[in-house]
Image (tube, rainbow, N blue to C red):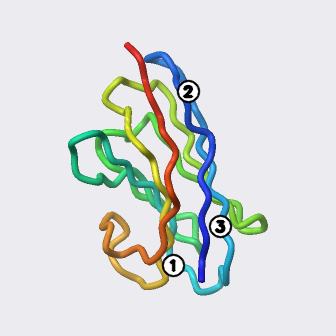
């Protein structure tokens, strides 16, 4: 069983920065990838960024490329999302997920475990 706990969300002005953290527990050697997804009010869950656990291979949604960066700390079982130049349209609940299989990194159904999420609100 894997448990995920996100933190670091909050209220920030447009153009500002935040760093989200996701603490994971469980058997990390079984993990394939970790990712961040987000869900804005009234919208579907949306892929943001993912990183393979064993190699520093990343993937990003086009909407966040050049502004967001995902990283992981294998020793601490942590994954981070560094968000810069935030925009009001980035407002959403951000959740991290763990995938144990080798499926597409940008698909929500590839991920087996999810955290509760952390709210990010960007004011204009």
**Quadrant of the rendered image containing residue 53:** bottom right
Name the residue tied to disc 2: 17
Name the residue tied to disc 1: 32
**Real-space Cα separation, disc 1 to disc 2, in angstroms:** 28 Å
119 versus 95 height, above or below: above
10 versus 75 height, above or below: above
**Viewer-proximal residue among 101 and 96:** 96
**Real-space Cα separation, disc 3 to disc 2, in angstroms:** 23 Å
| Sequence-first disc among 3 and 2 | 2
Label 1 crowding class (10 Å Cα cut-off): few <14, some 14-19, many 20+?
many
31 versus 92 height, above or below: below
Name the residue at 65% across, 85% down: 29
Label 2 crowding class (10 Å Cα cut-off): few <14, some 14-19, many 20+?
some
Element type at mark 2: loop
Query: Tag on residue 24?
Result: 3
Give the residue furthest to the top.
Answer: 124
**Quadrant of the rendered image containing residue 23:** bottom right
Tags 3 and 1 in contact by the CB under 8 Å rule?
Answer: no
Q: In the rendered view, does 78 fall on the left or right side of 75?
A: left
């Amino acid at each position: 069983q894997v448990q995920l706990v996100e933190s670091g969300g909050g209220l920030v002005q447009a153009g500002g920065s935040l760093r989200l953290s996701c603490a994971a527990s469980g058997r990390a050697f079984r993990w394939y990838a970790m990712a961040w997804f987000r869900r804005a009010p009234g919208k579907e869950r949306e892929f943001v960024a993912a990183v393979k656990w064993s190699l520093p291979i990343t993937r990003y949604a086009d909407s966040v490329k050049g502004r967001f960066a995902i990283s992981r700390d294998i020793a601490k079982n942590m994954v981070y999302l560094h968000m810069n130049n935030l925009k009001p349209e980035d407002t959403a609940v951000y959740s991290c997920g763990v995938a144990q299989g080798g499926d597409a990194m940008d698909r929500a159904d590839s991920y087996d475990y999810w955290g509760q999420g952390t709210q990010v609100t960007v004011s204009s």
